[in-house]
Amino acid sequence: MEMLIQFLTNTGYYLADYRHVIMLAVGMIFVYLGTAKKYEPLLLVPIGFGILIGNVPFFKGFGLGIYEPNSVLHYLYFGVTTGCYPSIVFLGLGAMTDFSSLLARPKLMLLGAAAQMGIFFTLLSALALGFLPKEAASIAIIGGADGPTSIFLTAKLAPHLIGPVAIAAYSYMALIPVIQPPIMRLLTTRKERLIHMSELREVSKRERIIFPVVGVILCCFLAPASIPLLGTFFFGNFLKECGVAERLAQTARTAIIDTATIFLGLTVGASTQGDVFLTPKSVGIFCLGAIAFSIATASGIIFAKIMNLFIKDKINPLLGAAGVSAVPGSAREVHLVGQKEDPTNYLLMHAMACNSSGVIGSAICAGILWSFLL
Amino acid sequence: MYGFEAIDAANGWSMAVAGALIVFSGLVVLSFVISQINKVLTFLENRFSIFKPNHKAPQANENETEETLEVPHYIPSNIKEAARYYYPLIEGLDQPFDLTRLYEISQQKGFPHPHITISHLRQACILAPAGDGLFTWNQPQSEKN
């Protein structure tokens, strides 16, 4: 009888408290959004299920939890805390990305740069709210709307915030269809949304091969701390474009990125244990993350409008919203908002140009912030 | 510490301004350099081609086909209409064909947004997979739509 009682007191049912219940509900919402609503399912499903796994109450000291040394989850989490998974994800992203539209119209890269302003505004806001500089930088990078970059920088600067930062970054990426369209409509007139972009010129294979080489040299010389992200990103792109390593490129954009995404999502989700995650700081991070993401969207749009004052070949300002690096969600949203106004307006390829420059921009920002706060 | 005092203490203003300037200037330089890649390549190509013994200036009418192809100003949202514009292009290709080839030809002929239209034709099964990454024109399906 005593043994039975001891067993029952060690079960999750007995050990659970309100924090577990809250986090299990959050996990279920993530899984629901990913599965039923199809909001970024490749991210939300592993993260959501990770939250469920990480918040099953257990008897401490058995080496089960993600924060307990020698547990399986702890070893898997090692890829997050060292920044390995984000680097591997960037390799796959590079092997997936087609820079043709960016090469055809390089000035769209400026919109990717402008959208990074959300990061620096949030840095100031987080500092003003009393966060330490390294924590503030980790929160600010959420404005880049790039999950792996956010995780990478947070792992380097404020590892104790990885859970909330990652969850905030991925949540806002998944909520792009909810967050971005109102900002786009608020900041643009109908006439602006109707602007058609001129056809992109054809980009030669040689240009596409030269770009990753030039890109890695220019960007990594400027911010060497971004080498772990941009080095693998441009390498992946070179594999794709060089034409002689198609097998490697194929593996990078399928098996490798998928494996890294699974472990990244699952362990980040599992790192949100109620007792560690449910703190006032997490609430602050979520609020600041939303502000960062909104300001990034707005600054891209406003910059596009400013550019239109000086150039003949007008840019549709909606493209500015794709300057955040949430690939391809924000580009898709820009395209859809444009099509709502005029079904013959195809903005997708142009928006992808801004999107891919946003990826480069946010990785450079991460490198800059890391070097400032080393 | 909170507010402006906290920002000052952490050198927040200088970090934000310097960071924004660095990332902006970095991307401006990158965009300038990539805008020149095409020009440099064209320049080098022309420079070396004049030294080739059999160099011949490209003629405007070389390889020009005289077919009466209807090139639309925009592709209609009705997929059947879009298919009507694309069908003459398909006729000129070996069957089954590669989508990259169809894309190249449609772009050469000046069709607007070929990427998206080809994608829509695929979704509507008008371009049907024939294995090995090749496609065929699924005429009956196109008529159905």
Image (cartoon, coloured by chain):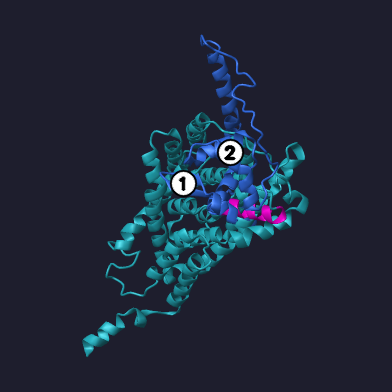
Q: Chain of mark 1?
A: A
Question: For this rendering, which residue is in front, A265 or A292?
Answer: A265
Residue A278 rendering spot, x and y as whole percentages: 48, 70
Image colour for chain B is blue
**Residue in view at x 31 percent, y 58 percent:** A75
Q: Determine whether, in the image, residue B129 is placed left or right of residue A202.
A: left
Q: Amino acid at mark 2?
A: Leu
Residue A298 rendering spot, x and y as whole percentages: 67, 53
Q: Amino acid at mark 1?
A: Leu
| Image quarter hosting the C terminus of chain B | bottom right
Residue A85 rendering spot, x and y as whole percentages: 40, 51
Query: Which residue lies under the disc numbered 2?
Result: B89
Q: Secondary structure at mark 2?
A: helix
- Near mark 2 (Cα within 10 A), the count class, few <14, some 14-19 or many ≥20, is some
Highlighted magenta segment, given as a residue range = A329-342
Residue A177 rendering spot, x and y as whole percentages: 60, 60
For residue A279, say whether it is visible: yes
Query: Which residue lies under the disc numbered 1?
Result: A93
